Amino acid sequence: MSLMGILDRVADVDAFDKVIEPARRAVNAALRPQSVKDLLHGTWLGHALHPVLVQVPVGSWISAGLLDAIPPMRPAATVLIGTGVAAAVPASLSGAADWSEQDTGVRRLGALHAVANSAALGLYVGSLVARGKGRGTLGRVLSYAGLGLATGSAAIGGHMSYAQSSGASHSATAARALTSDWIDLGPLDDLPEGRPALRTGKGGSVAVPLAAVRRGTKVDVFIGACSHLAGPLYEGGVEDVRGRECLVCPWHGSAFDLDSGSPRRGPAANPQEKLEVRMEAGRVMARLPARNR
Ligand code: FES
């Protein structure tokens, strides 16, 4: 069995949930209010923050590993290890915020990712202590062990992102299935005012759900699958979030600006894919924007 096959087996073990669920509740209780979580998700940035923040510890620790191999450069390696240890704290917090809003299988692997990262961090802290006491050889052994563990943990994180789609935009994925032609969504007068309605567009042999929101004569049309975890936005609501009218997901409460599709409240960090709209003889016509065609 491949390494990634082993990770999939780990993600299947429901016995882990006895420990994971209380940990998830603790993370949710600690990362309050919602604005703190949104800061850590990267909702304000329109991009997941965790993969951005992890660049610092990963880059620092790999560079330290190289410099440790050159004796005159070892003091610089110690500085880089300290930088990585400090940067690991916000990176861990953003990862914990994302993890607490993920599906069950992702949470199981995420728990393994967190344990491995914590162990790596402990080894690096031990390395700094050893170096501070003049025990350079022990310090290097500990930091190389930390680097090995952090590398393995990064592979788990990559599996969560790519194989389990934990950070991908699910609305961008759904948009790929939609025809690039104009879609007739029916008469404007059939749409309810100020709340999302389900409409569908052609996607080869399957229908792709869309969420259409009418405000007077203006209609905003989104891919129906939420960018966070594909929740049904057409079953959500419209709400004012920090001064902007937003389409709100019924699953985890992510809010997307009706005018732009930008996330205004997490856990979503990616924008919601929005279609171009025009009226034709009182009917609503929608089409994917050029970047999706
Ligand atoms: S699926 Fe999680 S907020 Fe929409």
Image (cartoon, helix red, strand yellow):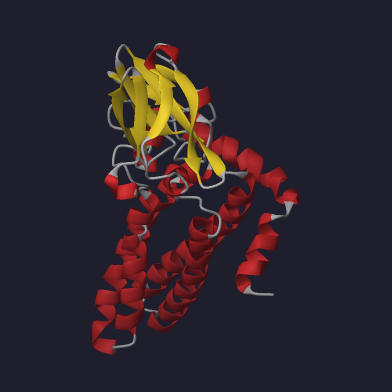
Residue 238 rendering spot, x and y as whole percentages: 41, 18
Identify whether 74 is placed above or below 182: below
Left or right: where 54 falls relative to 228 = left
**Residue found 52% across the figure and 70% down from its top:** 152
**Residue found 31% across the figure and 75% down from its top:** 63
Residue 175 rendering spot, x and y as whole percentages: 43, 44
Identify whether 136 is placed above or below 153: below
Q: Is residue 33 visible?
A: no
Work out whether residue 22 or residue 199 is closer to the camera in this orientation and state it: 199
* Residue positioned most to the right: 15
Work out whether residue 210 or residue 226 is closer to the camera in this orientation and state it: 210
* Residue positioned most to the front: 281
Query: Which quarter of the picture shows residue 195?
Result: top left
Query: Which quarter of the picture shows residue 211?
Result: top left
**Residue found 51% across the figure and 58% down from its top:** 118
Q: Quadrant of the N terminus?
A: bottom right
Identify whether 219 is placed above or below 118: above
Residue 104 rendering spot, x and y as whole percentages: 63, 45
Residue 43 rendering spot, x and y as whole percentages: 35, 38
Q: Is residue 128 visible?
A: yes
**Residue found 43% across the figure and 26% down from its top:** 185
Work out whether residue 70 or residue 56 is closer to the camera in this orientation and state it: 56
Q: How many marks?
A: 0
Left or right: where 187 falls relative to 46 = right
Query: Which quarter of the picture shows residue 11?
Result: bottom right
Work out whether residue 124 or residue 98 is closer to the camera in this orientation and state it: 98
